[in-house]
Amino acid sequence: MTVAAPDSTLAAIQKKVRRLTQNTSANLLTDDQLNEYINTFVVYDFPEHLRMFNQHITFTFETNAYQDVYYTDTASYGSASNATANPLYDFQNKYISLNAPVYIGGYNSMFSQSREQFFAIYPMTNSIQSIGQTGNGSKTSFSGNILLINGQTSNSAAVINTQNACIVKNQVLFTSIDINQNSLARQDFPLLDSVTGNPTQWGLLVATNVVPTAPILITAPYNNLATLQANNPSLTFNNIINYTTGDFTVTFNIAPGVGQPVVSQTLIQAMAIPQTMLFYGNQITMRPVPDQSYRVNFEVYMRPTYLMETNQFPQLNEWWQYIAYGAAKKVFEDKLDMDSVNLIMPEFKVQETLVLRRTLVQLNNQRAATIYTEQSGIGGSGWGWGNGTANF
């Protein structure tokens, strides 16, 4: 007689939860309610109780030229049609934590979670320059090239500068003063590609008190201002900056006063392979600003996947009883049945210990890395027993 293997599917978890909570009938606890309890525990509670070794994986994405900040939420991508294909789309909900080491283009790179440390190395000092034009009391619109103003050479205003420098997005400000001595200001607001959701080389210059609350998407091609305007007729471009070439047109709602200078405040950065990555505020920032695509990989803890089908197994079959006790605990908590919670807690903790055992044994197989571990070995050099000669 053949004996079936122990069942550890979602169906088995459902059965276990019903027995533990004495909700054996769907009239007492519907399947939809039951599955919600189970998957809430799997997706949200489980990874906070335990960080499992097999949930620790390597995450990879590629940088984009001229883009220093990478978003890990969903709202920042707007309604871009292909945004979900971006590996960083909703990263903050798919993964629990981001850890070193970080490799950029294959190089072991610095990883920081401190803005103070990061910007001490790569200062955010703005270049504050007059654009060389002053107000006359009636003129409201001014044009020029930021990179030329800041001493960067360029073949023409329409050609990318040869110094391999770029204007950092979200760091542009144009200011002046009107006839009544009131400040005038326009800040940049990057425009996103309608397909990828990534920032383009274009940014609107908007009043600082009416910054858009949602991303603005533009349709390609937009290689120059003429094609940008032709392909995006719903937008007006009398306030625009090209972060790549430095060309800009800024239009104030009130004319600067007679003789009042128009001043630009920008952050100009040289582009190269990034050497440092900052993770702060659920954003990834690279320095130097990438001059092309580079592969970036680092370690993350992946959130467990919820169970969708009754014949589906947890990521590891051995988790099934722990999940069942965790779901049962949530059922009792919603009923404020704390006596029953206390009754199942001892076995819940036993199952938690059993589930954690694999991770503990795995981690116990390797000692903690130190500066000395890489020097040990059985070769003929370094620390250890080599060719029979002790190294001192």
Image (tube, rainbow, N blue to C red):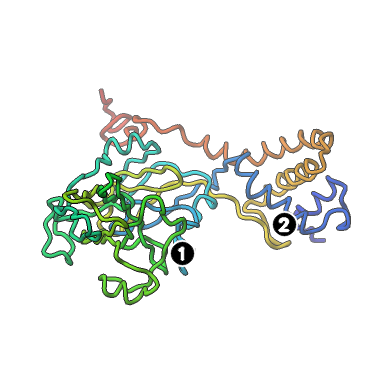
Q: Residues within 10 Å of mark 1 (few under 14, many from 20)?
A: many
Q: Nearer the viewer, mark 2 or mark 1?
A: 1
186 vs 385, nearest the viewer: 186
Kindly identify which numbered label has been placed on residue 379.
Answer: none
- Residue 40 point in image, percent of width and height: 68, 50
User: Label 2 sits on what residue type?
Assistant: Thr
Task: Describe residue 128's horizontal placement relative to residue 13 as left or right.
Answer: left
Q: Residues within 10 Å of mark 2 (few under 14, many from 20)?
A: some
Q: Residue at x 30, y 61 (%)?
A: 239
Q: Of helix, strand and loop, which one carries label 2?
A: loop
Q: Residue at x 26, y 26 (%)?
A: 391
Q: Residue at x 77, y 54 (%)?
A: 34
Quadrant where the C terminus is found in the figure: top left
- Residue 95 point in image, percent of width and height: 52, 49
Question: Could you tell me if residue 269 is visible in this image?
Answer: no
Q: Which residue is mark 1?
A: 83
- Residue 152 point in image, percent of width and height: 13, 53
Between the C-alphas of marks 2 and 1, the distance is 33 Å
Q: Which residue is mark 2?
A: 9
Q: Which quadrant of the figure has residue 231?
A: bottom left
- Residue 364 point in image, percent of width and height: 53, 34
Does label 2 or label 1 sit earlier along the sequence? 2
Quadrant where the N terminus is found in the figure: bottom right
Q: Is residue 377 above or below residue 84?
A: above
User: Label 1 sits on what residue type?
Assistant: Ala
367 vs 93, nearest the viewer: 93
